Amino acid sequence: MMDFALEEKQLLIQQAAREFTEKELLTGAQERDINEEFPMDILKKLGDAGLIGIQFPKKYGGQGEDYLSFVLTVEELCKGDSAFGITYAISSTFTTGIMTFANEEQKMHCLPKLFKGEALGCFALTEPDAGSDAGSAKTTAVREGDNFVINGVKHFITNSAVADYCMLIANTDLSKGPKGLTAFLIDLKTTPGVRIGHIENKCGIKSAKVAEVIFENCIIPADRMIGEEGKGFKYALTALNSGRISVAAQGLGLAQGAFDIAKEYMKNRKQFGKSICENQYIAFKMADLQTEIDMARLLLYKATWEQQESMNFAISASKAKLACTNLAMKVTTECIQNMGGAGYMREQNVERMFRDAKITQIYEGTNEIQRLIISGDIFK
Amino acid sequence: MKIIIYLNQMPNNTEENSFKKMSLSMGNRVLIEEALSLKCEINDSVTAVLVGDKKFQILLREAMARGCDQAVLVEEPIKTYPLSFVISVLLKKIKFDVILTGYRTLDENTSYIGSQIAERLQLLQVSFVNQIEKDGNVLLVHRQITDKTQVIRITPPCMLTVLDKKVCNGVLSVNDINKASEKEILFWNIHDNEKMIDSFLYKREWPKLRVVEKTTKNILSNYEIINCISNEENDEVKLVNEAVDAIIYRLQERSLIRIR
């Protein structure tokens, strides 16, 4: 018989993440959304609680737990503040790339600091002319002796304005197209020739800093190249597959968080002499939403399980991302509607979740790209 | 000081989704917090005891992640009266100075278990405790009674029933969870070694309730009320006091009671 129960340790880590969210994230989430500031101090506390790098080996300062523990943590953090949750998750996508493809020296260079919550990572692939068509990235890395000289612009890079490290995908041979793409580890704050350009004004995830990263004759030593030359696109896609699972977890956290708030509100709000949840029309809507949340959760946990078991999880990750993020949008929209005017106001937080939910359908591969991957698998 | 906390199975009902999880209730967390505040020397230890089947192990694991040194699961799904007997047999085998139980002491909300254990072990018991201070080997215990707080000096061993209050202990950390996972939970099954208890537990007819003489009277010298502070009188207490005065006045008027 299949076992759907979480293990004891996974449950305790989920509990730890939940307590962290309640104690550290919930109270300031609205304020951070208004001021658009990322709280580095809370990140440090998250590191102190041992919640960063859960799924990575102890040797580098991680916790050596499984990937599902990480997914549960993202879900819990995103219930309270999904902008913080996605910053954490994107940093983890960077870490996945480094952990899988970088050499020992490169790992030791950045991972311990990341896991203590003293630094953040980002993942720079997207360019103004290379969004969903990521293979056509035009940022160049030209070898000059023992160095590479990098030129180009990456944009919409989550975390870049506050991150210390970046996994950059640049082209070392434009004539080869995607096969010329190579991955590099960049110290964003200390390398000459790198600067942060325009910081984006966004609809949601306002306290997550998304910005342009500009490379102007940026010189990095050749030993900062990750893995082999020309394999960057493959590395990027592998990191993105894991990233998709964490964005799916963000979507699920948003959906569950909004659902919980709406549920409490509907129990307490009285109209026509009774709680509004006693009206079957909206109560049934909540029944549908909860059913769909459970469905999406199963899909996400299954994809995570496949990843843990070293199976080919790309298709499942795409399905989980598609289901969870569409669900986030649907649940937040319906919850605002069920709560009426109050749902539309900042104080109830669902409005913020509604704005945050939209981006989950777009980044880490738009949902159209996910459909492309899934349909490609169906008709292969 | 060896401290034992008696946890209950009361669920923390804040959890929502279908992957339901069990976690320690606030009442249980208060006990852990109070126990940890008494633990200040190297040899001090806190042991968490819980009655239930194996699915409740996670509560003990959480208790250890929150700072308890060891945990015992008593696998006896039985009612209050024999349960206090089982627990008292267990506790006779463990060295302890203080036992802490919650206000709603047991899983059926009967609140008897603490008192029954105290009686069986011939321990002093203070209930409605809202603060515990340590003064050398002696405890200063604040006991909440309607509108007053008694401060009681008590020499362990003793049993304290602690009121629910807001907990302030920190967030669980993954490092603590890892350490707790490496520790072993002791399983204690009364049938393993206590045949005579076996017959006691499964007797068809329970002894009839009878008032017994307080067994603790010979140890009352360890117990002294040293202070009694009136709390700020709130409206509710004021109303109750007025009502009591009015009733006493009427009863006196009709010569039904006489107050010296």
Image (cartoon, coloured by chain):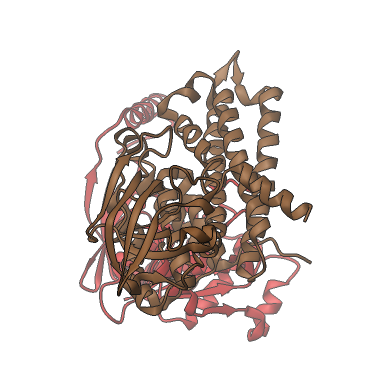
Chain colours: A brown, B red
Instruction: Confirm whether residue A75 shows in the render.
Output: yes
Q: Look at the picture and state if B117 lies above or below A294.
A: below
At 77% from the left edge and 56% from the top edge, which residue is drawn? A380
Q: Look at the picture and state if B65 lies above or below A244.
A: below
Q: Tell which of B242 and B44 is nearer to you.
A: B44
At 45% from the left edge and 44% from the top edge, which residue is drawn? A82
Give left or right: position of A163 versus A357. Answer: left
Q: Tell which of A93 and B171 is nearer to you.
A: A93
| Quadrant of the image occupied by residue B85 | bottom right
Q: Tell which of A105 and A64 is nearer to you.
A: A105
At 45% from the left edge and 81% from the top edge, which residue is drawn? B94
Return the x and y of residue B119 as percentages of the image width and height. Answer: 47, 68
Return the x and y of residue B79 as percentages of the image width and height. Answer: 64, 62
Return the x and y of residue B227 as percentages of the image width and height. Answer: 21, 53
Residue lying at the far front of the rendered structure: A175
Return the x and y of residue B32 as percentages of the image width and height. Answer: 39, 63
Q: Look at the picture and state if A93 lies above or below B75.
A: above
Residue lying at the far bottom of the rendered structure: B193
